[in-house]
Amino acid sequence: MTPHPFNITNARSHFPALNQPQIFLDNAGGSQTLNTVITDITNYLHQSNVQLGASYKVAQQSTSKYADGYKAAAAFMNAREDEIGMSLSCSNRDPEPHPHKFSPADHFTHPTTSVIGPSTTQLFTNLAQALRFPPGSEIILSSLDHEANISPWLRLAKSQDLTVKWWTPPPTNAHSLTLTRENLRPLLSKKTQLVACTHTSNVLGTIHDIRAIASEVHKIPGAMLCVDGVAFAPHREVDVKALGVDFYAFSWYKVYGPHISILYASQSAQTQLQSLGHYFHVPANDLSTKLNLAASSYELVASIPSILTYFGPDRKESWKAILTHEESLQSILLDYLNSKENVIVYGEESSDARSRVPVVSFSVLDVSSREIVEKVEACSDFGIRWGHFYSKRMVDEVLGLGPAGVVRVSMVHYNTEDEIQRLVEILNSVIP
C-alpha cells in the first residue's frame, strides 16, 4: 500500500477536547467531536431553532439546513443524491395538518433511502417493527454482533413465529473469528428472509467481507442483509452501493459528529417495509416517514455537512491516509501484546489494515481485565475500558470470558504514535 501524507497536528487541531491531559482510547464507544460540528449546532440553536416547514424566512433557512444534513449523510455513504429527498415528520404535539400548511412533498420529490435517528439500536428496533415475514421463515443472526443487531430480530422472531439460526464462525486461529460467505452458506435455505451481521466487531476489530456475504445472501430469492457498520465507519469509507447491502447503519457520534445515527435501506428493501408513521404522512413510500416516527434532532442533523468537509475535497485520499496512520498505531500496540506469552489478543493478531481496524481487545491470564484497566488509570491519563461492550453474547458464550470481559483499546486517526508507545510502557508496568 502506497502511504499518503497525514498531518496529525492538523487533524488534532480540529478536536478541541484533545487540548487536555486526558488521552482518549475509548473511541469505539464514541469519538471526540469536530469543532465545526460543535459550532454548527450552536449556531443553529442561536439562529434558526424553529419548527421545520413553515413559509417564513427563518423556517425556510432551518428546513434547508436540515435537508443539507440528509444530503451530506447520503454522500458520506455513497447513497445517490437523486435518491435522497426529505421527510419532515410532525411531532406528537403538532396540531393536525392545515390545508395550506407546508407539505414535504411540495419541495422534496425523491424518496429517501436513509433515516437519521437517536441511535443505531433504536433504528434497528424500528426497522424490525416495520418488517413482516411469513410464519416459519428463517432469520440468521451473527453471534459476534453488538446487541443492537440481535435483540430487535429476536423480538421479531418471537412475535412472527420465525426460526432463528445462529451464525458462529469457527476460529481461524485460537482467538480470531471471521464471518465469511463460506461459513454462512450452510445456514442459508429457501426459507431465509434476513441475515444480520456486523461489518466489524466492536470487540474483535476484524473486518468482514460484506460484499461477498451480500452476494451469497442474495442467491436466496427475497433474502435481505442487515449490517451494523458502527465499528467500521470511523475508520474506512462506507459505500453502500459497492457493498450491495439492503440495510446498513452506523452512529455519527463515533464518526466525529453528534449523538445521532443513520440507517440506509435500498430501494428494493424499502418495498418490504410497512410504515410506522401517522396515517396522514406523505409520501408514504419515504423511509424517514416509515421509520423515524418524528423528525430527527434538527440541530444535530444540520451539523453533518461539516463532517464531510473535514475529510476534504478528495475523501478517498483522506481515508487512505487515515488507514495508513491507523495501521501504524495498531502495529505498535499489537507488536507488544503479541510478544507477551500471558496475553491473549482477540481478533486478528496481524496489524494489516486490510483485515482489521484499530479496535484491539485482549486479556491477561489469571488477571481480571478490570484490574488491568484500573491500574492503567491509576498511574496515567489514558482512557481505556474493560467489559463486553454490548457484545455480551460473544464475550460470554463464544469467547468464554467472565464478567470483566476484555481490555479494549480503541484508537482513531487523531491518536498519535507517541500516545500508543507511552501506553505500551504503562501496560508493560502493570501486566505481570
Image (tube, rainbow, N blue to C red):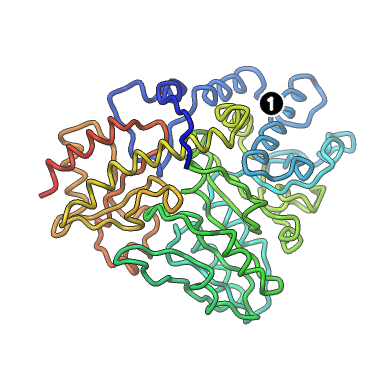
x and y, in percent, of residue 112 in the image: 74, 46
Please state which of residues 24 and 60 is positioned toward the viewer in this rendering: 24
The single residue placed furthest to the left in the displayed view is 432
Above-or-below relation of 168 to 295: below
Q: Residue furthest front?
A: 2
Q: Residue at x 74, y 23 (%)?
A: 61
Q: Is residue 35 left or right of residue 203?
A: right
Q: Which residue is mark 1?
A: 50
Residue 295 placed where, x, y %?
67, 40
Q: Residues within 10 Å of mark 1 (few under 14, many from 20)?
A: some
Q: Nearer the viewer, residue 295 or 120?
A: 120
Q: Look at the numbered disc 1 and give the secondary structure of its residue.
A: loop
Task: Identify the image quadrant of residue 127.
Answer: bottom right
Percent position of residue 398, x then y: 34, 68
The residue positioned 63% from the left and 27% from the top of the image is 313
38 left or right, relative to 266: left
Q: Quadrant of residue 301?
A: top right
Q: Is residue 406 left or right of residue 127?
A: left
User: Identity of the amino acid at label 1?
Assistant: Val
Q: Residue at the location (37% across, 47% down)? A: 359
From this view, report whether residue 278 is shown above or below residue 297: below
Give the camera-side residue of 79 and 288. Answer: 79
The answer to whether residue 189 is left or right of residue 278 is left
Quadrant in which residue 219 is drawn? bottom right
Q: Residue furthest right?
A: 99
In percent of width and height, residue 41 lies at: 57, 25
